[in-house]
Image (tube, rainbow, N blue to C red):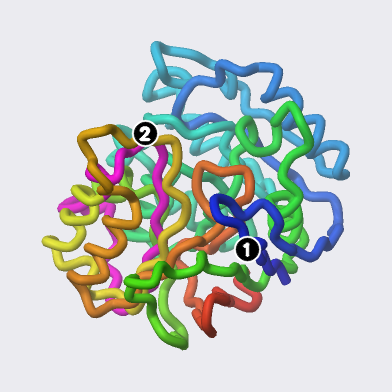
Amino acid sequence: MSIALPHDHHHEHDHAACQHHHGAQQHIYIYSPSGAVRDKAAFRRGIKRLEALGHQVEVDADALASHTRFAGDDATRLAAIHRAAASGADVALISRGGYGLTRLLPHIRYGELARAVEQGMRLVGVSDFTALQLALLAQTGAVSWAGPALVGDLGTEGEPDDIMLACFEDLLSGQGEGSGWRMPKPKADSAVPDDLYVQDARLWGGNLAVLCSLVGTRYLPQIEGGILFLEDFGEHPYRIERLLTQLLHAGILARQKAIVLGQFTEFRLTPHDKGYKLQSVIDWLRGQIDVPVLTGLPYGHVPTKVVLPVGAPVSLSVEGRDALLYWGHVH
């Protein structure tokens, strides 16, 4: 079972505990449905790492294609998605995110992806991949996995994050049953949920900006009583708030049992903000809805990321600062 318990540190949570299960060799299919791979060295390092862990890696013919900012034109990337679905691999892992999936959504053959999932394939990715994950869930109900990407997570110059690796290996071996973490210490004036237990709620979410881009389309799942997890990268807190207001005014936030905030990274505050920061947004959000808002989930554009089943029923328990998302065996 993957339990990531970040240590108590003011800014970060690099040390979490994930148990390692070395499973049998897995067939991993690498493809590029979004942005072009510019860092070829990281791409090769990621493949070598997976092979060193004992896995068989198959690289899509167009994984390194490039057309302006994309990994090939739309037809090329669509074909890659359908090849991944047909590959018979245990895991289809994206090379990287970026941007490119939302424009493909009307043309994806979701039934083929859902059949692959039914036959045991795990679709794994982060960031822009949120668009495909949520569309697949909305169209078919199939579960996919929010987790690492090849280039940014497995192809790092230094050693990949050990928590991320342990959680990914847990997924590969079928051992992953949950993710736990310790929430940041609340500020004195912060309203933090008391102990909480939510059973059998559908876990969904991903990148906040990508998710908001699906509001009002048939690609956003209509989930009542779910647990919504969110992360983002390079968005100033006021932009994060503006994206959240869209979900708020659309009635999406109030329909959930809990909102779980992951990592919001790579933004710069300005003198104009005068004390308005990410915590201001969280405090504001807590004042708008009666739904508990949890923070500190080790997931997002950060090295330490857990693996989460998008669309699966999960249980959530919170005792003090310790939170646990548990899904048992999702196959």
User: Measured along the vertical axis of the image, is residue 19 above or below residue 145?
Assistant: below
Q: Where is residue 33 shown, x and y percent of the image? A: 47, 32
Q: Is residue 237 left or right of residue 126?
A: left
Q: Which quarter of the image is occupied by the N terminus?
A: bottom right
Q: Where is residue 152 shown, x and y percent of the image? A: 61, 33
Q: Where is residue 82 shown, x and y percent of the image? A: 50, 38
- Mark 1 residue element: loop
Residue 268 is marked as 2
Q: Where is residue 25 shown, x and y percent of the image? A: 84, 50
Q: Residues within 10 Å of mark 2 (few under 14, many from 20)?
A: few
User: Measured along the vertical axis of the image, is residue 124 above or below residue 313?
Assistant: above
Q: Is residue 21 left or right of residue 246?
A: right
Q: Residues within 10 Å of mark 1 (few under 14, many from 20)?
A: some
Residue 27, visible in the rendered structure? yes
Residue 214, visible in the rendered structure? no
- Type of amino acid at the residue the image marks with label 2: Arg
Along the viewing direction, whichever of 7 and 263 lies nearer the viewer: 7
Q: CA distance from mark 1 to mark 2?
A: 24 Å
- Type of amino acid at the residue the image marks with label 1: Asp
Q: Which residues are magenta?
A: 215-240
The reply to whether the magenta stretch includes residue 234 is: yes
User: Measured along the vertical axis of the image, is residue 97 above or below residue 23?
Assistant: above
Of labels 1 and 2, earlier in sequence is: 1
- Residue drawn 60% across and 68% down? 181
Along the viewing direction, whichever of 72 and 189 lies nearer the viewer: 189
**Residue annotated with mark 1:** 8
- Residue drawn 41% across and 60% down? 261
